[in-house]
Image: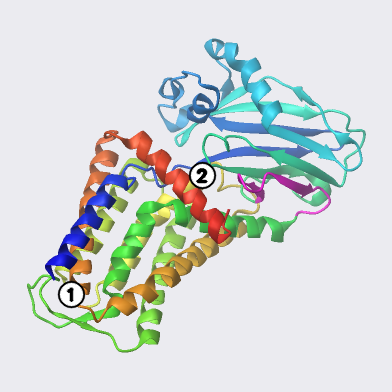
Amino acid sequence: MKTYLKILAAFMLLLLIVMPFSLEAHAPDQTYLYVRVYQERIECTVEIKLEDLNKALNLNIDPKKYAPESDEDEGLQPLPEELKIYRAQVEAYVLERVGISSPKYGKHAFKFMEPELLLLEMGVYWETKFELENVQDIPDALDIRYEVMFDVDPIQRGMTVVGHNWKAGIVNNESMTALVFSPGDTQQQLSLTDASLWKGFKAMVGLGMWHIWIGLDHILFLVALVLPSVVRRRRKEGELALSQTWTPVESFKSAFFYILKIVTLFTIAHSITLSLAALGIIDLSSRIVESIIALSIALAAYLNLRPLFNRSESFIAFAFGLFHGLGFASVLGEKGLGGEYMTLSLLGFNVGVELGQILIICMVFPFLFLLRRTKLYPYIIFYGSILLIIIAFYWFVERFFEINLLADDYISWFWRKSTNKIMHLIGLK
């Protein structure tokens, strides 16, 4: 057993070195292309966060200088004078990274309009606005090439939203994403003759799956819940998990469906708060929400060591799933929860999160089931839970006190590169 412990200790140390503790699990990591189709013209807007512009163009803009101080300060404002020196550089970048053509007219040139800043709590966005030239009448489709940020940040996604298209019955849409671009999928066609609700719904399902995969705190919360699913504790109050109080479950089916129930409770809970946030009924500070999410991981892991009551996983999954839902709301943010298609967007996103969670469970659960009878498994639960608690409190300190601890930039870059490669390997690019 000492050999097992040495191997496990080495593995834990490796995780401590490479784990991206400070990764902001709910940062949108998205740029946006808004398309508005009118009777005789097509207007577009590319929205990029100032932090992303700094990375893409090696600028030195201080986003905090332009951040809104209150809800009343949010919204569009003219581009400040000191930022106008970057306008030509940003427009050249958009021209290089975005191309739009149509089968009817070929490639469309861009007629740039005055840029603006969009001030939101989730970040400050540079809005590059342009009208498509050579549009004599509205074509049936646009062929779009979109590569914004993909070379410097492979986790980024490009969200295309048709904000207005009377011909297709879209009048006030800020929520239904029509297309999602990724580093492995930069060329797509946008139909302008129908609302493409099914296509938009599928895009939101994919977005939900993607964000559960890159949302490391959600994954670790699930891990904390899954670890005890293949064993049952013999009731000896006060004993830690490392003591030999665990007995393996006999049935794969019963254990698997039990953990699916836990995951579904989690989904139901976060769906409730995500919807309430969309309706504006709940509006909590992201600092508080993110801090509570970190604590939820610590509590779920602690209950693996010393349970407060039998089968506490169900209660924890639902109770803290409510806060995870508010975390998902910050993923969609103020930019993705309004308009006529809010219901479909929320449904698609939640379906995607559930599918993503089930996929994670299907990958992890069989290995845990095979290990459940070994003498090593109590140590996996014990030391794995301790590691989760350490990670959770690391996150809590960062999020609650709003500090950035050492080595974060490198670790975040490593995680993004690794995650993107994994997504390509399994086809979720």
Residue at the (41%, 50%) spot, across then down: 327
Decide if residue 280 is in sight here.
no
Q: Residue 223, image x and y in percent?
A: 33, 64
Q: Amino acid at mark 2?
A: Ile
Tell me if 199 is positioned left or right of 284 in this view: right
Q: Residue 311, image x and y in percent?
A: 25, 77
Q: Nearer the viewer, mark 1 or mark 2?
A: 2
Tell me if 141 is positioned left or right of 342 in this view: right
Cα–Cα span, label 1 and label 2: 40 Å
Q: Amino acid at mark 1?
A: Phe
* Foreground of the two, 233 or 204: 233
* Foreground of the two, 124 or 257: 257
Residue farthest to the front? 3
Quadrant (top left, top right, bottom left, bottom right) of the N terminus: bottom left
Residue 184 belongs to the span the image colors magenta: yes
Residues drawn in magenta: 177-195
Residue 101 belongs to the span the image colors magenta: no
Under circle 2, the secondary element is loop
Under circle 1, the secondary element is loop
In the image, residue 236 sits, relative to residue 34, either above or below, namely below
Identify the residue position indicated by label 1 in the image. Answer: 309
In the image, residue 362 sits, relative to residue 166, either above or below, namely below
Q: Earlier in the sequence, mark 1 or mark 2?
A: 2
Q: Which of the labelled discs sits on residue 415, or is there none?
A: none
Residue at the (52%, 55%) spot, across then down: 423
State the image quarter where residue 219 is shown: bottom left
Tell me if 51 is positioned left or right of 398 in this view: right
Residue at the (64%, 25%) spot, across then down: 93
The colour scheme used here is rainbow
Q: Which of the labelled discs sits on residue 155, or is there none?
A: 2
Q: Residue 408, image x and y in percent?
A: 33, 36
